Amino acid sequence: MMAAPGASAGDSIRRAFLWACSLDVMVAKPGNVSMGAAGHGMTAELFLASAEASAPVLADAGAGVGARIERAVMCTRAAAGCNTNLGILLLCAPLAAACERLGQPADPARLHATLETVLAGLTVADAQAAYRGIALASPGGLGEAPDQDVAAIPTIDLRSAMRLAALRDTIARQYANGYADLFTVGLPVLRRQLARRAVWPDPLAHAVLAVYLAFLARFPDSHIVRKHGLAVAQSVTHQARAWDRHVATGHALDLPGLQRWDHELKLGGINPGTSADLTVACAMMAACIDPSLCLAFPALPRAGMERVT
């Protein structure tokens, strides 16, 4: 990962994480909380406060993946008082550990290989710490699992525990498959859309929306499944496919239409939170591969940029 002159790997990881988390709320994604559209009892300010509070521990040099997750959840709870970013932390902690190991310019293939090494090295202690973090975050709709339930103390390593949940949870599947969905779906879409910067008035927002819609169009959102059932999640995925096809064929997004869809989803209490989490992790991944993105496409409020540059 290319760090700015004089910056440590931790500084670069923290900057990439904050950039990605800021995009999460600065770009209005249907069903999600954004700067211009609160929802689900939360505001964008809570998400930004959570990101700022959790970034230092997520980028803590030498810390284990489970410890990063647990401590980041603790910092989030102290800053926001609720669960705003558990999925983001679960996805970004292994990514931060992999970027720390690289510590130099990395292409997607090298990052992918290093991330696989990090996942393969996860331990029972990582699982126990991550489970404590999940319990503290107290996400809604988890239900019970027949084996290695999050309410119990895990007896297997974190990757093995995630494999048990991979069929029902897209975030867990990333641990199982080495983040294949991010590398083969999200990252190519993001890079392709940013390469069209001369076409769109706001290429960054267009790219983030394109990634979000790509995930939502391909995978029934795990958060929706837990809260509302598979049928509702599949219905939202079906709606997303039309938008995804529109973007994939080079058309500009119908922003008023997306706003109407956002209103409909929030009116029904439907939040495609897992798709948003995958989008944040994808943006962080892109910024770890090419840190100049944070400068070419600034997303943080000015004060936030001054704190991380």
Image: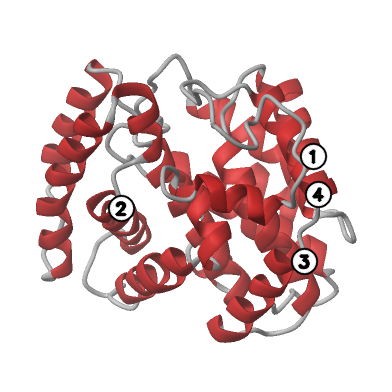
The residue that appears at 90% across and 61% down in the rendered structure is 62
Q: Mark 4 points at which residue?
A: 124
Disc 3 versus disc 2: nearer the observer: 3
**In the visual, does 197 lie left or right of 159?**
left
Identify the residue under disc 2.
Answer: 209
Count residues near mark 3 (Cα–Cα under 10 Å), then give few for <14, some for 14-19, many for 20+: few
Q: First in sequence, mark 1 or 3: give its number.
A: 3
- Residue type indicated by callout 1: Gln
**Outermost residue, right side:** 62
In space, the residues marked 2 and 4 are separated at their CA atoms by 37 Å
Contact (Cβ within 8 Å) of mark 2 with mark 4: no
* Residue 70 shows up from this direction: yes
The Cα atoms of the two marked residues, 1 and 3, are separated by 15 Å
Here the colouring is secondary structure
Relative placement, left or right, of 207 versus 241 is right
Quarter of the rendering occupied by the N terminus:
bottom right
* Mark-to-mark CA distance, 4 and 1: 6 Å
Residue 75 against residue 158 in the figure, above or below:
above
Do the CB atoms of the residues marked 4 and 1 lie less than 8 Å apart? yes
Classify mark 2: helix, strand or loop.
Answer: helix
